Image (cartoon, rainbow, N blue to C red):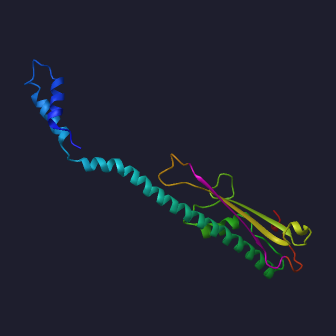
Amino acid sequence: MAIQPTRLKQALLRWVPAHRPRASQPLVQAALRLCVTRRASAAVEFAISGLALFAFIMAILNFGLLGFSLGTLAHSVQATARKAAVYASNQYATTGIMTCPDAAMITTFFNGYAQPPLPGAGTATGSNPLITATWTNNSSGAGGGAEWNGVYLTLTVKYLWSPVGFNMFVKGIPLSITTAATVMGSFDIPTVVSPSCQS
């Protein structure tokens, strides 16, 4: 709503020294023109509301990226565990000895599935994503009912997801996926298991 020129003029004239009204007249007229004009008001309003609009759009974008990263992480972990178990089974079928892939090979499997949506993973402390692979050899069934029979891999991948544009407010959201895969043929037939299948 525009300010009434007559009221504004009266208010401004109160601040002008009484003995120099004519000398201050151009200043009063310039102030009136500045306060009454509506030019560029849309730009000012957009500048105020545009920040909230931009933050809302960035929040939608980040929620989409978070869901995409979580889906990629879950798929990559499951596919990596399955591929490692199949690799060990193929080694047994080929050589007669069940040899399980080491952590470096499992990391290569994971990066093949996860990149480029996720950065390259590692097994060292501080890696992001961080891979923890544990092989368990219970092919004899000695573990009883508390454990699965056979050779199986427990694979955990932790990833600290960072939002786009909100790094100063949200440092990161930790994501973690754990899955397990049993090596085919290790629980129903006598097998020769390599030490690599026991972490």
Residue 195 sits in quarter: bottom right
Residue 185 belongs to the span the image colors magenta: yes
Task: Count numbered badges in the picture.
Answer: 0
Q: Which of 4 and 192 is in front in this view?
A: 4
Q: Position of 115 compared to 147: left or right?
A: left
Extreme residue in the left direction: 22
Residue 116 sits in quarter: bottom right
Give me the residue at 60% from left, 61% from top.
Answer: 120
Q: Is the magenta stretch mostly helix, strand or loop?
A: strand
The picture places residue 101, in percent across and down from the top left corner, at 75, 69
Report the span colored magenta. Answer: 171-186
Quick check: 160 above or below 135? above
Give me the residue at 17% from left, 33% from top.
Answer: 7
Q: Position of 171 compared to 107: left or right?
A: left
Residue 149 belongs to the span the image colors magenta: no
The picture places residue 49, in percent across and down from the top left corner, at 35, 50
The picture places residue 93, in percent across and down from the top left corner, at 80, 82
Give me the residue at 15% from left, 38% from top.
Answer: 33
Q: Position of 22 compared to 52: left or right?
A: left
The picture places residue 129, in percent across and down from the top left corner, at 63, 58
Q: Nearer the viewer, residue 65 or 127?
A: 65
**Quadrant where the C terminus is found in the figure:** bottom right
Give me the residue at 69% from left, 55% from top.
Answer: 124
**Quadrant where the N terminus is found in the figure:** top left
